[in-house]
Image (cartoon, helix red, strand yellow):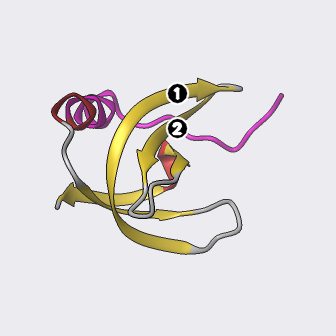
């Protein structure tokens, strides 16, 4: 299956892993599959790989879990 996914840098991937381990709140900016831009404070929960694409699983402010494709994240910082 072909996809337009672009792998992220290993260093960036490691930063996501550390944020998960430390239960850090992140201010995260990303673009969803429809192109809508989001900016939310989230808690990173896990990293997943599916169909050769990597996702950051986060808990949103309303408690729902979102899967955000790593190459769609434009920026993040500790909240």
Would you say residue 3 sits in the magenta stretch? yes
Give residue 9's position: percent from left, percent from top: 36, 34
Residue pictured at 38% horizontal, 63% vertical: 61
Q: Where is 50 relative to 71, above or below?
A: above
* SS for callout 2: strand
Locate residue 16 relative to residue 32 in the image: left or right: left
Locate residue 21 relative to residue 7 in the image: left or right: left
Find the distance from the CA under tag 1 to the CA under tag 2. Answer: 5 Å
Q: Residue furthest front?
A: 63
Q: Which residue is mark 2?
A: 55
Q: Which residue is mark 1?
A: 48
Please state which of residues 35 and 58 is positioned toward the viewer in this rendering: 58
**Mark 1 or mark 2, which has the lower sequence index?**
1
Q: Are marks 1 and 2 in contact (CB under 8 Å)?
A: yes
Residue pictured at 47% horizontal, 40% vertical: 57
Task: Name the quadrant containing residue 15.
Answer: top left
Q: Mark 2, residues whose alpha carbon is within 10 Å: few (<14), some, or many (≥20)?
A: some
Give residue 28's position: percent from left, percent from top: 34, 60
* SS for callout 1: strand
Task: Name the quadrant containing residue 33.
Answer: bottom right
Give residue 16's position: percent from left, percent from top: 29, 37
Residue pictured at 45% horizontal, 63% vertical: 62
Report the span colored magenta.
Answer: 1-18
């Amino acid at each position: 299956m072909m996809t337009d996914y672009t792998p992220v840098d290993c260093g960036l991937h490691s930063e996501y892993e550390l944020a998960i381990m430390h239960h850090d709140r992140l201010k995260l900016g990303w673009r969803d599959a429809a192109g809508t831009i989001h900016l939310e404070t989230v808690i990173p929960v896990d990293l997943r790989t599916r169909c050769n694409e990597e996702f950051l699983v986060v808990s949103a402010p309303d408690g729902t879990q979102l899967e955000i494709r790593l190459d769609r994240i434009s920026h993040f910082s500790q909240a």
